[in-house]
Image (cartoon, rainbow, N blue to C red):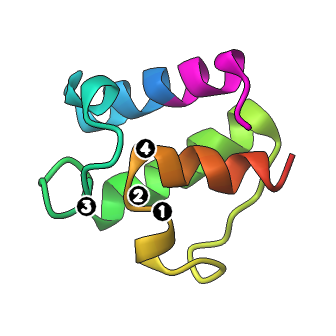
Amino acid sequence: MATVNTEEKVLDMLEDICDDDAVREERDIDLFDAGLLDSMAAIELLVAIEEEFGVQIAPTAVDRDEMNTVNKIIHQIEVRL
């Protein structure tokens, strides 16, 4: 289960990268389909995750559908902490 602190950090990160606060309300929306994330923003997100949490997630390590929602991103971080 994600800690509140982890969730808040991820939400802040995504809000900044996606430049939209919708990520806070719709945590199961596909960020790519909604146009909130593209391939460049996804790389930016992976770098931010590594800097913030010390967790490395290589772009080839997970399928896009494993990190396409806020909740899935939080889960991927939590299983690596």
Q: Position of residue 4 (x, y in %)?
A: 66, 17
Q: Is residue 6 magenta?
A: yes
Q: Position of residue 3 (x, y in %)?
A: 73, 24
- Asked whether the beta carbons under mark 2 and mark 3 sit within 8 Å of each other, the answer is yes
Disc 2 marks which residue? 42
Mark-to-mark CA distance, 4 and 1: 8 Å
Q: Residue at x 66, y 79 (%)?
A: 61
List the single residue furthest toward the front.
1
Which class describes the residues within 10 Å of circle 3: few (<14), some (14-19), or many (20+)? some
Mark-to-mark CA distance, 3 and 4: 14 Å
Query: What is the magenta segment's predominant secondary structure?
Result: helix
> What's the amino acid at mark 3?
Asp
Disc 4 marks which residue? 70
- Asked whether the beta carbons under mark 1 and mark 2 sit within 8 Å of each other, the answer is yes
Quadrant the N terminus occupies? top right
List the single residue furthest toward the right.
81
Residue 20, numbered circle: none
Quadrant the C terminus occupies? top right
The secondary element bearing badge 1 is classed as loop
Mark-to-mark CA distance, 2 and 4: 12 Å
> What's the amino acid at mark 1?
Met
Disc 1 marks which residue? 67
- Left or right position of 52 against 70: right
Q: Residue at x 20, y 28 (%)?
A: 22
Q: Which residues are magenta?
A: 1-10
Of label 3 and label 4, which has the lower sequence position? Answer: 3
Mark-to-mark CA distance, 1 and 2: 9 Å
